[in-house]
Amino acid sequence: MFKQLSVAMLLATGFAVASCASNPPANPNNACSIFDENGGWYKAARKSEKRWGTPVYISMAFVHRESSYVGDARPPRKKLLGIVPWKRLSSAYGYAQATDEAWEDYEKESSRWFTDRDDFGDAMDFIGWYNHRSHRKLGISKSDAYHLYLAYYTGPTGYRQGHWKKSPTIQGYAKKVADQAARYRAQLQRC
């Protein structure tokens, strides 16, 4: 009996873990296709939009840029002596590539606990919260994907100090996010 019970528990645990993990969508450039594949993702994105005001198409463009929809994405490791994997460039992790510090701020300020950066719903809520904070602190419109991403990438202080103005690379990232958001917006109006 115990052997049957432990096999059943092992199967249930394996199923629960497997159901939490999602593969990246087959067509990450098409919002309709993404949500057809992952219906729960649309629900999570809409929930974040209702709570924080960041449109679904912008939040999705952030995830596209940050992790390409890979739930356990991390920055590359530095190399010691050019060959030995060493420390990571930052603590960024998950769909939203949130750093440890930013995630802790999010949990405190949003009153959400037991959240995970590799959970799509939690990542959507984090992006909404972060953009709401950028709107409140920096006056950025919640529909301005370009400037929201600049603030997301550089942080509120970096944005305010204009660090991004001297970096064509960061401006290029923000333009890609804004362009992807515009594509997603047009697609979502048709599906």
Image (spheres, helix red, strand yellow):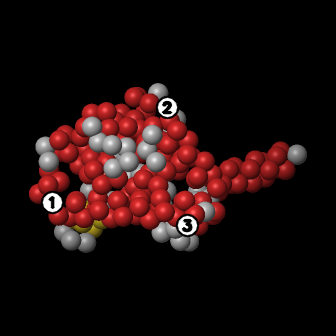
Precedes in sequence: disc 2 or disc 3: 3
Residue 126 place in picture, x, y as percent = 43, 42
Q: Which residue is mark 3?
A: 25
Looking at the rendered image, the disc whose residue lies closer to the viewer, 1 or 2, is 1
Query: Could you say which is closer to the camera, residue 186 or residue 59?
Result: 186
Q: Which residue is mark 2?
A: 112
Q: State the separation of the CA atoms marked 1 and 2.
A: 34 Å
Whether residue 65 sits left or right of residue 41 in the image: it is left
Q: Secondary structure at mark 2?
A: loop
Res 167 label: 1
Query: Looking at numbered disc 2 in the image, what kind of residue is underneath it?
Result: Arg
Query: What residue sits 40% from the left and 29% below the top?
Result: 109
Precedes in sequence: disc 1 or disc 3: 3
Q: State the separation of the CA atoms marked 1 and 3.
A: 31 Å
Q: Alpha-carbon neighbours of circle 1 within 10 Å: few (<14), some, or many (≥20)?
A: few
Res 68 visible: no
Residue 29 place in picture, x, y as percent = 48, 69
Query: Looking at numbered disc 3 in the image, what kind of residue is underneath it?
Result: Pro
Q: Alpha-carbon neighbours of circle 2 within 10 Å: few (<14), some, or many (≥20)?
A: few
Query: What residue sits 14% from the left and 48% below the top?
Result: 162
